[in-house]
Amino acid sequence: VRCRVLDAVADAPRAADWDPLAAEFVGDGQNVVVARRLLRALAAVIHVIDGDKAARAESLLAAGGEPSIVLARWARLVPLLMRGDEPVFNDKAAVKQLRKALRSSSTAARAAAARALRLAGGESALAAALEHFPNETAPTVQLQLVETVAALREPTTPEAGKWLAAIATGDYGEDVRERAIVRLGRSGAKEATSALVKALDDRSWQLAVCAAVSLGKTDADEAFAPLQRMLKHADWKMRGAAVVGLMHWSRPEIVEPLIVMLEDADPVVAGAAHHALCTVSRRYETKFAVKDWRAWWGEAKGKHDFTDREATLDKLKKYGYAVPDSEIYQGLDVIVFESRGDHIEQLLTRLEIAHRLTKQGEIPESGVHPEAIFVSNCTGELDGKDEEPLAWYVRTGGSLFGSCWALSETIARIHPGVMQKANTNGQVLDNVRALPVDATSPLLTGVFPDGVVPIYHLEGAHLIDVLDPERCEVLIDSPDSAERHGNGNLAAWFFSGHGVMFDSANHFDLQGLGLAGKLKKGEERQAYAIDHLGLSFASWRETRGDGFWRNPKKAAEEVADLSAFRLLTNFVRSKRMGVY
């Protein structure tokens, strides 16, 4: 009820709504799904209040006494007040307001403010982040400041390059250094090379492999020699990262070394070399065979165009949101981790999307590589020897998607400390309405058509407990789930090295009309499909007289629930466009 009230206020704000919202802003105890909506509603009301809107907004802090929870909320509210035709705060005024949270003794408030600086943008925000960083001791805040500086000043500039390089090789936490190393991986980042070469020898293999990939992404002349030496490293993870780095460096000199790596003793390294050659040659159908690649190079040497694929590909045209979902997967290596709970492979087969399977204990032999996508079905239980290859895959640029138990059994095992299974009372068995946290997010394009509210089927679900709210973005939540299970986070993601981790609390395949057992008539199934599955009226008009609607099994086979799959597809689309 509270969420519906706040959504209504956000849609149709009135000055009279101020008092109850202001009272809630300075209070605690609200579930996070309510708190998110509270900020949106408050921002909407402040925008319509007569008089000095900035002063009215600032009165929230005065009334709250600036405790941690209020300052964190304030930091998240300020960027919302910069939106619209008549923003309450411009960039300079916003930074002034965010400094109040940056001075807090609360790590949570400072982290929220550090991220909000990035959203505020401008030179004032950049200056505030640079000024605050030397005095900051909390790694979660330092990480947000690194991301803010990298976002507001191109790492290719000498100033940002030197600053990030000092952090990459400095005495900071591993996560903080990792973000600096990753952000240095930009073509033309001249200040990055020496720092990245130094990081190749870091005792943390996670940092070393990130450095190898970033070194290749700099396109620096000096990158080739250290990456070539790294191909002979005793550790397969280092050899594999050097392969990926050379793929990004993409010059004629890399072809011979990559062909040699096709015969590496480790299947992950050999597979990465094959797909690196596919990428730089743009010959995705070439077989995994040394003789075939030598034959190609014998003909192409001196003729092949190694122009950076980022500069030559019209990605918006090829992978943009107007392109059908099925085309996004064409030529992509889709790897599915077979498991007991979810079966996205069945949905992929129905959609005629090519994929291959792997299972527990076989990931090292499956040849995971960062040009692929990896889907971990629920339950997602890894064998011990599966963990390092998957962690390497993501750190070097892979996209890993998990459903339900895969949150605990895959994601939290290979990158702990960002999100985990929520502590709920017993199993979560439920059907709940799913809602967008930020409807403007491009990652939610097509997931929530107008008037459509997806129903998520939670089959013993692992709901998402966000441990680092500034690093981990929740895309979908549910007031129903929060009401009945104490947690409403249904879909969330975060960066891990050069790659991303995404989790959905529901299953990718166990959805749709097959679970709507109480619907007895064809008309009821049609209405459900329009309201909750996103069936278009055009499709309904074409099929409303078909007999399959009268049979629950046949109706479920004919009309799929693609809401969770569309969310995954948007990540794949972003990966292929070079966004993530």
Image (tube, rainbow, N blue to C red):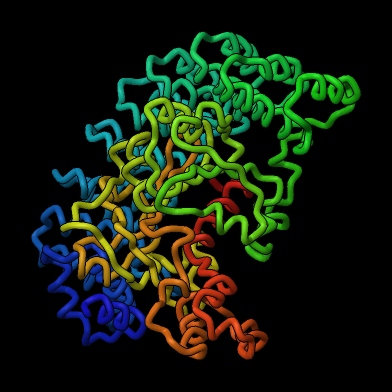
- Vertical placement of residue 386 versus 457, above or below: above
Q: Nearer the viewer, residue 313 or 521?
A: 521
Measuring from the top left, give residue 32's x and y in whole percent.
23, 62
Residue 8 position (above or below residue 561): below
In the image, residue 511 lies at what x, y percent? Answer: 45, 66
Depth order, front residue of 247/140:
247
Image location (x, y in percent) of residue 168:
41, 24
Which image quarter: residue 320? bottom right
- Examine the rendering and report whether any part of residue 225 can be seen: yes
**On the image, which quarter does residue 269 sit in?**
top right
Tell me which corner region of the image, top left, top right, bottom left or bottom right, holds residue 453. bottom left
Residue name at image x 35 percent, y 32 percent: 176
Q: For the N terminus, give its image quadrant.
A: bottom left
Vertical comparison of 514 with 461: above or below: below
Judge whether 306 appears above or below 199 on screen: below
Task: Report whether 401 appears left or right of 45.
Answer: right
Which residue lies at the image location 53% right of the left edge and 66% below the top edge? 562
Q: Residue at x 37, y 82 (%)?
A: 518
Residue 106: image x %, image y %? 16, 46
Q: Nearer the viewer, residue 214 or 58?
A: 214
Task: Name the residue: 52% across, 31% down.
Answer: 396
Residue 148 seen by the camera: no
